[in-house]
Image: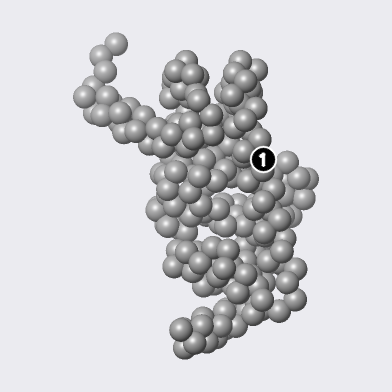
Amino acid sequence: MIISAQSKKTDEINISKIDFFLRFISSICEIPPAMSNKIIAKCRVQELKKGDLLNADVLELNVVFISLGVIRGFTMAAGKDITLMISQETQLIGASSLDVFSRNDYALCYQAMEDCCLVLLPIKLLNQLRDQYKQMDAINDRFIWRYHAQATERNLLSRLPTAMLRFSRLMFADPGLFDRVQDKYLSSYLVMRHETLSRLRRLKKKAS
């Protein structure tokens, strides 16, 4: 079989992008070369342009690691687009195991808020790695801990009683999102009207 120069170049680019994921998990624990090689061989890279939706088929077979960019998770209810989560670099996204998000009436969708680079981690591969390498225990623990911390933060944001408190909390916890995500999506995430978020942003700018 003849492998073209273009194909080799594409493979090299994909490996360099998967390398970011490898360096991230290597910061958690030492990764054996054989484990790294399996990840490089089985994972693939997907790029999304701003506004693109992540194909639902991808989420059936993969967990998705965000190497670059911001992704929002949203659902539709009574004709309204509701932003439920906003994820960014080094975070994982994937199809929720919760029944409420697997039903047709509240399907969970993912959309790129800016140009994104994603590493697709096949669920089958992750199960194999878990069986073969003890390092996966530490990696799983780190991701599970981060997932619960992020879920707790989202729950807090949705339960704070005033728009000002929710705005202030996100400004404290993750101010960079205000420059990376459109206000119409942030206002939905913060459970407030677009006009309310605009007013709060003006007040903060005036105060500073």
Q: Residue 165 placed where, x, y %?
A: 66, 76
Pointer 1 residue: 144
Q: Residue 203 placed where, x, y %?
A: 52, 87
Instruction: Return the residue nearer the eye: 89 or 75.
Output: 89
Q: Is residue 94 left or right of residue 53?
A: right
Residue in the picture at 60% in, 55% down: 73
Residue at far right of view: 99
In terms of secondary structure, where does tag 1 sit?
A: helix
User: From where the camera sits, is residue 75 visible?
Assistant: yes
Residue 144 position (above or below residue 39): below
Residue kind at label 1, given as amino acid type: Ile
Residue in the picture at 65% in, 17% down: 131
Instruction: Return the residue nearer the eye: 198 or 134.
Output: 134
Q: Residue 180 placed where, x, y %?
A: 45, 63
Residue 25 position (above or below residue 180): above
Residue 98 position (above or below residue 30): below
Residue at far top of view: 1
Q: Quadrant of the N terminus?
A: top left
Q: Is residue 2 left or right of residue 44?
A: left
Instruction: Return the residue nearer the eye: 121 or 149.
Output: 149
User: From where the camera sits, is residue 61 visible?
Assistant: no
Residue at far left of view: 5
Residue in the picture at 56% in, 83% down: 200
Is disc 1 surrounded by few (<14), some (14 to 19) or many (20+) residues within 10 Å?
Answer: few
Q: Quadrant of residue 74?
A: bottom right
Q: Quadrant of residue 159?
A: bottom right
